[in-house]
Image (cartoon, rainbow, N blue to C red):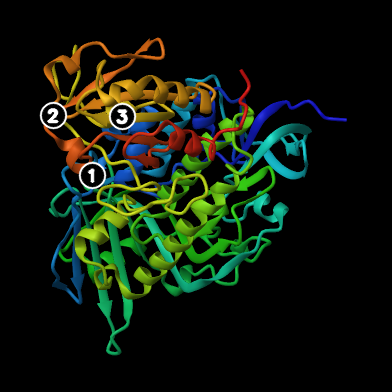
Amino acid sequence: MAHTHATDVLVAGAGPVGLTAAAELRRRGVSCRIVDRLPARLPFAKAVGIQPRTFEVWDHMGLARTALEAAVPMRGQFLYVNGAEQPRIDLSVPPEVPYGFAALPQYETERILDEYLGRFGTEVERGTELVSFGQDADGVTCRLRAASGAEEEVRTRFLVGCDGAHSIVRKGLGLSFEGGAFAEEYMLADVRVDWDLPPGYAMRAMHLGEDGAVDDVLVCIPLPGRGRYRMSMMVPPELSTAGQAGAGSDGITHGLQSGRGPALPDIQAVLDRLSPKPTTAFDIRWTSVFRISHRIVDRYGDGRVFVAGDAAHIHPPTGAQGMNTGIQDAWNLAWKLALACAGAAHPDLLAGYDAERRPVGEEVVGRTVRHAVEGMENDPDDSATLMMREAQLLVGYRGSPSVDPAGEGRGPRPGDRAPDCTGLTAPITGYPMRLYDALRERDHVLLLYGSRFGPGSETGAALDELVRTARESSGGRTEVCLVLAADADADAHAIIEADGTTLPVYTDSRGEFARLYAAREPTAFVIRPDGYLGARLSPPDPQQLAAHLAKVFAASPPN
């Protein structure tokens, strides 16, 4: 007998990854509960780096402005070796990328996502822990324990484990978590200093011993607030947690450790040794000792249960890749889960989460370990490619079962990130718009590019059929937008209708869309809810469009 489902999805863990998953599910109308064993948000600036791609995700969700106003820009890094200044690293992205690098304490990221989730009437159930679960063909039965000790059984369609390095969900699925650990321990501190380094720059100072190995290090990442930094440095022997019970019952040592945290004199001692200029630390907010492991699961899910973020991959904090990668795990999974909950997903769509995200996790673990050992400055890639990769703008899903074959040619291909562009004009607005303005808070979008869509044109004749195909093949879940070429006929700006509705029309007035998308003739682009291209069809062909959408949507979506 089938159980009734108390909720569509249960999310275990309310860090940035779990909050992103829950918020995206609720934004799409999916019922969702999110639980976290901690009684309150931790006031620790653990993960602080925000990558440009994460801001693009937040833009699509409609909360980029809130995050931008809370963050501080990250402009680059000063590097010192044995007291000598090395070439400065400047963080930059191409001009068409709408956002730069930034720093935001993790507690602020969680607050922003928490408040956003609250817009949809959902709050984190704090002090509530997932203790066990079992799944069958119809759903997942989860056992929750409240702070009072009271237990509750919850029946849900899907379970998402965003519950960190010691994940109950990962253990319950029996996933392997292979890797290793670094012997070194580090101190973390959130403090202020009185130096005059330019704001917006990180500082890394290293000391190399006679054998050329790093035997002392200080890394300072700027935080909001004058002179405030999150600092990390090696642990002196008296503060070591080695041999303590900080590893957890699974033997994994990763993240903040229990035991005595460093005090201001411990931090000052490192600054006295390594700071490029004499400086005094003060106004300490918190300190901790942390350890680093590098591990990844053998698969990102099993049946109706999935893992994301630190539950799936842990690695050195080099380049601030961890939290950002986890947020994008959740971003990738949520729209697929929403379709599955609506009965509108192709049977294999959810399997695509592992196919798309696990290779990303493997690459990030490998790269951060390499950078931690050899230094980012020794990366073999040229600096522009390195910046784009660190910004997570090169993440892509070519070869995924739910996108079309990438094929040959210039411009973004299926599986690539859909780039932003500026200079779009619309009939009523008196200012140029960005493509991401047109895509914000939309799910699947069929974007049609060409010079003429009016009656009598070849593209215009196919328009009705393309729009009808997009809607019928996706159960009404694909919106259609037109982008007119810069040289479009004057009458092309007239009201354009297809399949009985008026379509939104933008004009590529500066030719930026054509340049960045390498579009020279009429072309159809299917842009997924997560901002990646699912298909590129030139010329736009209704049958090819239907074939692509059949990889994503159920054959007969419910009405």
Query: What residue is shown at x 57% (from left), y 53% (from top)?
Result: 311
Q: Residues within 10 Å of mark 3 (few under 14, many from 20)?
A: many
Residue 518 locus on image (x, y percent): 22, 44
Depth check, mark 1 against mark 2: the one in front is 2
Quadrant of the image occupied by residue 97: top left
Disc 1 residue type? Gly
Tell me which label, 3 or 2, sits earlier in the chain. 3
> Which of the image's four quarters has the C terminus?
top right
Quarter occupied by the N terminus: top right
**Dot 2: few (<14), some (14–19), or many (≥20) neighbours within 10 Å?**
some
Q: Is residue 112 left or right of residue 340?
A: left
515 up-or-down from 204: above or below = above
Under mark 3, the amino acid is Leu
Between disc 3 and disc 1, whose residue precedes? Answer: 1
Could you classify mark 1 by the number of other residues whose Cα lies within 10 Å: few (under 14), some (14-19), or many (20 or more)?
Answer: some
Residue beneath label 3, please? 448
Q: CA distance from mark 3 to mark 1?
A: 29 Å
From the image, tell me which residue sits under label 2. Answer: 486
Q: Nearer the viewer, residue 514 or 14?
A: 514
Residue at (51% x, 44% y) in the render = 402
Q: Where does residue 373 sit, x and y in percent of width and height?
A: 37, 74
The residue located at (20%, 63%) in the rendering is 383
